[in-house]
Image (cartoon, rainbow, N blue to C red):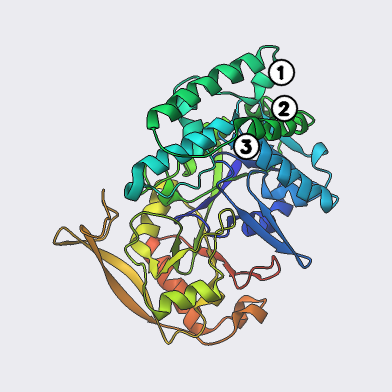
Amino acid sequence: MIDLLLGLQWGDEGKGKIVDVLTKDYDIVARFQGGPNAGHTLIFDGHKHVLHTIPSGIFHEKSMNVVGNGVVIDPVIFKKELDNLAKHHIDYKSKLLISKKAHLILPTHRLLDAASETMKGKAKIGSTLKGIGPTYMDKTGRNGFRIGDLQFDNWEEKYRNLTQKHLKMIDFYDVDIDFDLKELENEFFEALEVLRTLQFIDSEEYINNAMVSGKTILAEGAQGSLLDIDFGTYPFVTSSNTTAAGACTGLGVAPNKIGEVFGIFKAYTTRVGSGPFPTELFDEDGERMAKVGNEFGATTGRARRCGWLDLVALKYAVQINGVTQLMMMKGDVLSGFDTLKVCTTYNYKGKEIDFFPYNIEEENVSVNYTEIKGWHEDLTKMSKADELPQSLNNYISFVEDFVGVPVKIVSVGPDRKQTIKV
């Protein structure tokens, strides 16, 4: 069996930390979708580590780490990640495996991303401009460039053909973006040589054989369920399936091999970039969450929008993923609020509903809140469940009753030690 770890909101829930906490129980950690627009932050032993593509299990000695076929890889960013690991004497070459079917992000993919966003003007979707969308477009268009292609003699010809196609597309957009392709390519080809020193594998065969031999496997998702290309707040979404189904297609695993599904959510809600956000706050409460929670994107550095916990959206994410256990992050950020609010229903086109509808744009949706008593205790020094204040336990119970799934872990700070099993 293979267990899954997924974000249940708009990303940035704290998946990296929880993977790091759980990894000691797993032989293999596998990333199954997304690209370097993800940013998993881990803090331990006084050091902060940010990973974008490499699975978070890389810091544990016994864990093998697989970048699955559903991932798109930017060699330049990947090389920077490897360089940072080398600074900390992490032996990544012996425990990092890359699927031959994973697609590569070319320099012109990033240029296409920038050209597309520029052309949209005010209607832009808030892309991280990492080239993820155009790479997935080439994947579904059946002319993408994959890791396995690097093992064949004609790989450079294939690269040139795809690059020329991209340049014609950029000309068609007719927007003003400055770039030096030669400089970008020099950096790209240098990074490719580093990538070639790693182990390329048929990852679906590796993962399935590992399951047969009794290995324990944790599949690590990126972004969040509300950014899923099918089930998220389209078109303000990412370009891959961030939900549980994406683990099957992103690793070559059958649905009946899925075991536990760990769902990660913040005690409040955040979102980066454009898109609807029903519980977003524009007052002092929202500013306080952002400041205390240090809400800035690990990849982009962009400030995150903050709001109260949206239980309608959370229940929806639990439902479409088949979540079996919940893990609540950043409970410490809410310390000091006299009263907390949670969204329990929407007003949708004049009717009160308790489910996540087709469109949650502001003109269609407003929210109804339930108020819950807050807590003032400093959670960051706590290490046991029986130390948690009763008001926090009541908050947790309210969430559990609403979504029908138990909360098993509460995070009370960024360090791996600040994690309490409840």
Whether residue 212 appears in this view of the structure is: no
The residue wearing badge 3 is: 74
- Left/right placement of residue 401 relative to residue 143 reads left
Please tell me in which quadrant of the rendered image residue 195 appears: top right
The mark that comes first in sequence, 1 or 3, is: 3
Q: Amino acid at mark 3?
A: Asp
Q: Camera-side residue: 332 or 39? A: 39
Circle 1 residues within 10 Å: few <14, some 14–19, many ≥20: few
For residue 151, which numbered disc appears in the image? 1
For residue 200, which numbered disc appears in the image? 2
Q: Camera-side residue: 120 or 28? A: 120
The mark that comes first in sequence, 1 or 2, is: 1
CB within 8 Å, label 1 to label 2: yes
Question: x, y percentage for residue 368?
Answer: 26, 70
| Distance between mark 1 and mark 3 Cα atoms | 17 Å
Q: Amino acid at mark 1?
A: Gln
Q: Point out the residue furthest to the right here.
A: 89
* Residue at image location 57% in from the left, 39% down from the top: 32
Question: x, y percentage for residue 115?
Answer: 44, 38
Q: Nearer the viewer, mark 1 or mark 3?
A: 3
- Which corner quadrant holds the C terminus? bottom right
